[in-house]
Image (cartoon, grey):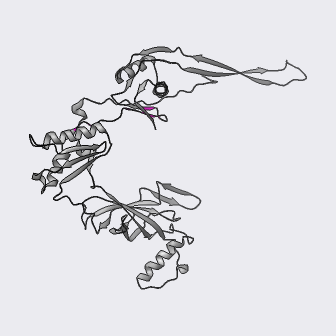
């Protein structure tokens, strides 16, 4: 319709309903880990060479100094001021050292430009020691840098895809030293929950005691707090702790968590758990539609008139229409399904649902944590 403008807002709503207990069970391996068994972060400083004029500029003093130091160790004496670094870039190299990985294995490394290089495309990382928090060298990285994109063109007309100053070297680091974790002969283990919760910790300890504790023997698992369960290793497993851990990791339990309603205001996405409850509350919601209509009136002088001009006069007409709202009463402790059905009866959109849930939470009637992302 000419002269009329309407704006319609649409959004996507996602509601996740959790299934019964049997489908909710999770392996202990997926919700907890053995205390002390974890990856470690490695970092190193290195040089990427072989760039096509996209390296650091001469103002990057640390790059020229690094090149001079490297060449000096190779028996060549150079003054850093005499070195041009267009084809070289100083980089930080990072990697994650998994637990129990042995010397001779390989891991991936990430390479990120430290100076003002414009691209690492086509570059090669030269031998770079990777150190841990204790300043010991655990791996050495080297290899061709792979970028997930490209850059082409001239200074005035350039096309690039994805980030050009950071890349990855698959299997680019060789492990030189492992972080030892002594398990053989241990008399006690500790399980740490990835999402601490008192109920989950109690269920985890109960599952271990039901499965592994001998009949009539005292329990071997004790919840220390919401995030930790201590396990006394039975004498039969002192020389087979790995076998004990394998059995524990395979047990199924139902993890518990705080009831949440997660809302993404930008997309209108709403995710609710099955335990959402409402206190008694009444909800009324209505929409307002605004239409702006512009008509043009043309005024012309009389025929054969000596004076006068044609005048176009716009006349705007604004019409506001408020849709009829419905009042719905929700009883106390209704389930999530009833809440959704009741709100659908009101005819709310996902965007409206966000506003309604925020208002219900502000009124103190939503018995769940409301998280907005």
Q: Nearer the viewer, residue 146 or 70?
A: 70
Q: Nearer the viewer, residue 309 or 184?
A: 184
Residue 134 in percent (x, y) is at 36, 66
Residue 343 in percent (x, y) is at 43, 20
| Residue 169 appears in the picture as rendered | no
Q: Residue at x 39, y 62 (%)?
A: 94
Q: Is residue 91 left or right of residue 196?
A: right
Q: Residue at x 19, y 58 (%)?
A: 183
Residue 73 in percent (x, y) is at 41, 82
> Can you say which quadrant of the picture contains the N terminus?
top right
Q: Which quadrant would residue 269 be assigned to in this image?
A: top left
Q: Is residue 225 magenta?
A: no
Relative to residue 221, is residue 66 depicted above or below? below
Relative to residue 218, is residue 235 depicted above or below? below
| Residue 157 appears in the picture as rendered | yes
Q: Which quadrant would residue 48 be assigned to in this image?
A: bottom left
Q: Is residue 254 magenta?
A: yes
Q: Is residue 178 left or right of residue 261?
A: left
Q: Residue at x 29, y 35 (%)?
A: 256
Q: Nearer the viewer, residue 203 or 82?
A: 203
Q: Which residues are magenta?
A: 253-269
Which residue reaches farthest right?
Answer: 306
């Amino acid at each position: 319709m000419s002269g009329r403008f309407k704006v319609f807002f649409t959004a996507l709503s996602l509601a996740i309903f959790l299934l019964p207990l049997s489908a909710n069970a999770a392996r202990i391996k997926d919700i907890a880990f053995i205390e002390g068994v974890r990856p470690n972060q490695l970092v190193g400083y290195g040089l990427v060479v072989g760039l096509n004029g996209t390296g650091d500029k001469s103002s990057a003093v640390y790059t020229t100094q690094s090149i001079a130091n490297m060449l000096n160790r190779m028996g060549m004496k150079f003054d850093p001021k005499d070195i041009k670094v267009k084809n070289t870039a100083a980089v930080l190299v990072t990697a994650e050292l998994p637990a129990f990985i042995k010397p001779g294995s390989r891991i991936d490394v990430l390479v990120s430009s430290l100076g003002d290089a414009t691209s690492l495309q086509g570059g090669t990382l030269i031998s770079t020691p990777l150190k841990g928090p204790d300043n010991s060298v655990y791996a050495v990285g080297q290899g061709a840098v792979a970028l997930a994109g490209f850059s082409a063109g001239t200074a005035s007309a350039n096309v690039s895809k994805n980030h050009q100053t950071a890349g990855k070297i698959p299997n680019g680091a060789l492990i030189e030293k492992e972080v030892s974790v002594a398990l053989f002969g241990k008399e006690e283990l500790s399980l740490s929950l990835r999402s601490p919760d008192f109920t989950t910790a109690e269920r985890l300890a109960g599952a271990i005691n039901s499965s592994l504790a001998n009949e009539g023997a005292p329990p071997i698992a004790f919840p220390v707090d919401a995030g930790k369960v201590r396990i006394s290793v039975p004498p039969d497993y002192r020389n087979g702790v790995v076998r004990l851990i394998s059995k524990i990791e395979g047990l199924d339990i139902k993890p518990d968590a705080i009831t949440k309603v997660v809302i993404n205001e930008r997309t209108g996405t709403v995710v609710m758990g099955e335990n959402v409850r409402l206190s008694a509350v009444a909800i009324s919601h209505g929409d307002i539609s605004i239409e702006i209509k512009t008509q043009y009136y043309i005024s012309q002088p009389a025929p054969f008139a000596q004076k006068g001009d044609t005048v176009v006069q716009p006349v705007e007409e604004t019409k506001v229409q408020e849709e009829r709202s419905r009042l719905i009463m929700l009883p106390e402790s209704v389930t999530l399904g009833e809440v959704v059905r009741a709100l659908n009866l009101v005819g709310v959109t996902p965007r409206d649902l966000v506003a309604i849930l925020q208002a219900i939470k502000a009124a103190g009637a939503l018995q769940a944590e409301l998280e907005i992302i």
